[in-house]
Amino acid sequence: MNDLEELVGRAEADFAAAVTPADLENAKARFLGKAGQVTELLKGLAKLTPEEKKTRGAEINQTKQKIEALLTARRQALADAELEVQLKAEALDVTLPGRQRGTGGLHPVSRTMERIEAIFGSMGFDVADGPEIEEDWFNFTALNTPADHPARSMHDTFYVDTKAPDGSGHLLRTHTSPMQVRYAVQHVKKHAAKIAAGEAMPEIRVIAPGRTYRVDSDATHSPMFHQCEGLWIGENVSFKDLRVVFADFFRTFFETDELDIRFRPSFFPFTEPSAEVDIAFGSGPLKGRWLEVAGSGQVHPNVVRNFGLDPERYIGFAFGMGPDRLTMLRYGVNDLRLFFDGDLRFLSQFK
Ligand code: PHE
């Protein structure tokens, strides 16, 4: 092997030993740079005769070309390897299942609320909203339940230690019935001129759905639960109208005509007479069983007076039903607490 072949061999080994582009450029300088071994050889030509220069020059040039070709090949190999590493690092597994955006859904009780509002809305009822931290007066006293009334003990609740404008305390409302008074008082104010002139006031027809609170907790009671109040007051509104409204509502809500309704005598301080409303399905898993779905009654004269109306002239009914209970019946759920646990395995079944 002559010196030139040996030089090519060393260049090849040096280039192969370079693992980074910077190493490779240093190796290149050792052979092809200004003071590189090939350059030195070319400088050495000066000492030769013209004949020798010709052959030796051609041999050195060939050597230079070989080394340049090796350099180019090694550069390419390093660039390929780098690309390979990069591609591996950024690898996309196109067989992985895609990430899906979960579709949300309404809570089953919210669905019931919306249904109640839509059905009563179609019967000409307004929908009203009121405070959950309520004044004692609206929650009890105005509803014919004075401070010493025994019915208060059935509505034990959470009291908030601030005074209302009338000097009474605040509490978490135990039912939506205070909305009867709040809504009626506003309605009466709005039509005060007509009422003062002895003209007929437009009827009050409203529902008030919302959250209510009591110290209660088991499979069918939760400390927070929902109610939907209803109130219809006019000059000639009777229990007969209540029955028609309920029949219409429950048949539409449960999507069946095979449904019986009965009124069972009961007591509420703010209605007289009072009745619990029971329904029974004519078919399905609950066929023939009477299920309590609402409290109701003719609004007590004292309450009508608190509305700011004359009970001799204005009369009507009120009711309060439990949307949680209706949701349980509609979907066949047997534990109320499932609605409030926030467990997605349960809730996502209602999407
Ligand atoms: N507020 C009563 C309750 O919570 C229900 C009711 C409302 C009864 C309206 C009669 C009239 O038990």
Image (cartoon, rainbow, N blue to C red):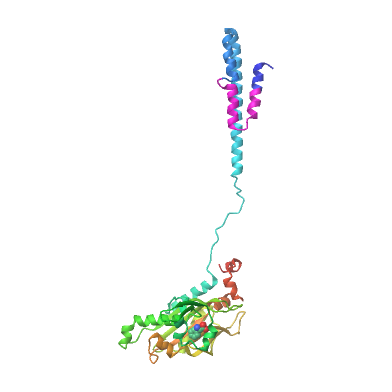
Q: Nearer the viewer, residue 262 or 346?
A: 346
| Numbered label tally | 0
Residue 247 visible in the current orientation: no
Q: Give the magenta-colored segment's residue range.
A: 10-34
Q: Residue at x 58, y 24 (%)?
A: 29
State whether residue 289 is above or below residue 225: below
Residue 55: x and y in percent read: 60, 11
Residue 274, percent across and down? 50, 89
Quarter of the view holding residue 333: bottom right
Q: Identify the residue at horizontal 66%, vertical 26% (top origin).
A: 13
Find residue 236 and report its horizontal and vertical position in percent: 40, 89
Q: Is residue 340 magenta?
A: no
Magenta: predominant secondary structure element? helix
Give the residue at the far bottom of this rendering. 312
Q: Quadrant of residue 218?
A: bottom right
Image x and y of residue 211, in percent: 50, 75
Q: Residue at x 55, y 85 (%)?
A: 278
Which residue corresponds to the image point at 37% horizontal and 81% vertical from the top-left?
187
- The quarter of the rendered structure image containing the N terminus is top right
Looking at the image, which is closer to me, 262 or 113? 113
Give residue 313's quadrant in the image: bottom left
Q: Is residue 345 visible?
A: yes
In-front residue for pair 90/304? 304
Compared to residue 96, the image places residue 321 above or below, namely below
Q: Is residue 16 magenta?
A: yes
